[in-house]
Amino acid sequence: MAAKRSRAPLLVVLALAGSLIGAMGATAAARWPVDDDRPAIAVPAQSTSPAPAPPALVPLTVLTWNACANARQRCPAATRHRELAAAIGQAARNRSADVLLLQEMCADLLPALGSSLGADWKVDFRQATTAAVRRGTRVSRPATCGADGGRYGQAVAVRAAVARGAGAASPVQASWLVQLPSPEPRNSSWMEQRFAVCVRLRAPRLQVCGAHLSTPEQDPDGGIRAAQAARLAAEARRGRARGNPTIVGGDLNTTPAATVTGRRQLVLQPLYDQSVDCDLGRMQATFGTIKIDYLFSGPGIKPLGCEAIQAPLSDHRMLAARYDLHPNPTGA
C-alpha cells in the first residue's frame, strides 16, 4: 500500500511536465515556420491602373454634288457662277462638311468659291479633256466651259480643320488625277474623257476620290462604266494598302440596279464588293426620280447615313454623308 501511494505524486509531476513541454513546442512552432521543400504559393498582384481607353473616332462629313456649271440650257448655275459658289459654301457650313466632291465645275468660279468657303479650305481643281475623230484621226483637246473658254472639270475641296494634328501644314498631303477608261469617239463630236480626282489627307489618314463617270448615252451597255468602277475600286485598294481608309464618290451616272448588258453583273459591282454605300439601302433619288450619285466607304470608316439635299441651281441634288473614322487604320 505504501509503495502505491509513493508513485502517485510522481505520475502527476510527469503529466504536468509533458503538458508544459507540449505547450512550449506549440509556441515555438507558431513562432518559427517549418522549413520544408514545398514551394511558396505566389498570390498575383492586383493592378490598380485603369484599362486604356479605346481611341476616339474622328467625325467626318463628306458632300458630293454635280454643280452643273457648264450646261446653259439644263441648269441656271451656268450663268450664275457667283451664286453657285455662294451656294456651295453655304451647304458646306450648314452640314459642317469636311470634304467636298464637285463635278461639272468651271474654273472661273474658283475665286468666288474660295471666298465663300473661307481661308481654311484647300480646293484642288483638275481640267477634263475631250476627244473626237477629225479626218479619220483621233484628236483631243482641253475641255472648256461655254464661249468664254474657261476650264471645265472637277474639284475636291478639303477643310483644314479635318486634318487634326497637321498644324499649319496643308490638309492635303498629296493629290492626283486618275484616268478612267472612256468610250472611243465615234464621229466629229467631242466626247469627254472621264477621270477621278484623288486626295490624301495628312491626319487623320484618309484617301478620298471624286469621279464623274460616262453617261448611259455614251455607254449604252454599261461595259465602259463597269470598267471605270473597277478602276476606282483598284485605286481605293491601293490607298488602303498604304494604310489609308478610302471614300469614293461622285456622279456615277448609273442606278444601283443597272447591269452590264448580257451579263448578270451590276455596273457598280466592283465598288459594292469592297465598299458600303452611305445610303444603307434607302436609295434616295439624286437626279429626278433616280439615284446616280454615291459615296462609298471602305474598312476603317463607319457610315452613319446620308441625306439627299435639294439644290435648285443644278439638276442634281447634293448628297451629304456622315462618318466615324477610325484614327488608327491598322486597328480598324
Image (cartoon, rainbow, N blue to C red):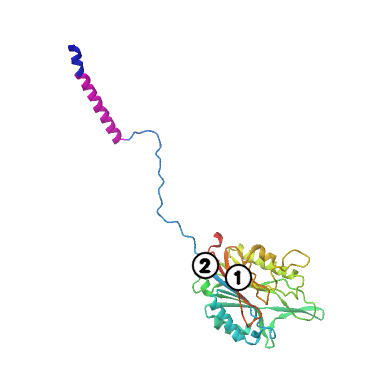
Where does label 1 land, which residue? 208
- Residue 232, relative to residue 127: is it above or below? above
Q: Can you tell which quarter of the image residue 249 is in?
A: bottom right
How packed is label 1: few (under 14 Cα within 10 Å), some, or many (20 or more)? many
Task: Give the numbered dot on residue 73.
Answer: none
Of the image marks 1 and 2, the number of the one nearer the N terminus: 2
Answer whether labels 1 and 2 touch (C-beta < 8 Å).
no
| Stretch of the chain drawn in magenta | 9-32
At numbered mark 1, what does the secondary structure look like: helix, strand or loop? strand
- Image location of residue 9, percent across then percent down: 19, 19
Residue located at (75% from left, 69% from top):
223
- Distance, label 1 to label 2, CA atoms, is 15 Å
Q: Is residue 59 magenta?
A: no
- Residue 78, relative to residue 10: is it above or below? below
Where does label 2 land, which residue? 58
| Residue 39 falls left or right of residue 59 | left
- Residue 190, relative to residue 324: is it above or below? below
Q: Main secondary structure of the magenta part?
A: helix
| Quadrant (top left/top right/bottom left/bottom right) for the C terminus | bottom right
Residue type for callout 2:
Val
Residue located at (69% from left, 65% from top):
269
At numbered mark 2, what does the secondary structure look like: helix, strand or loop? strand
- Image location of residue 271, percent across then percent down: 67, 66
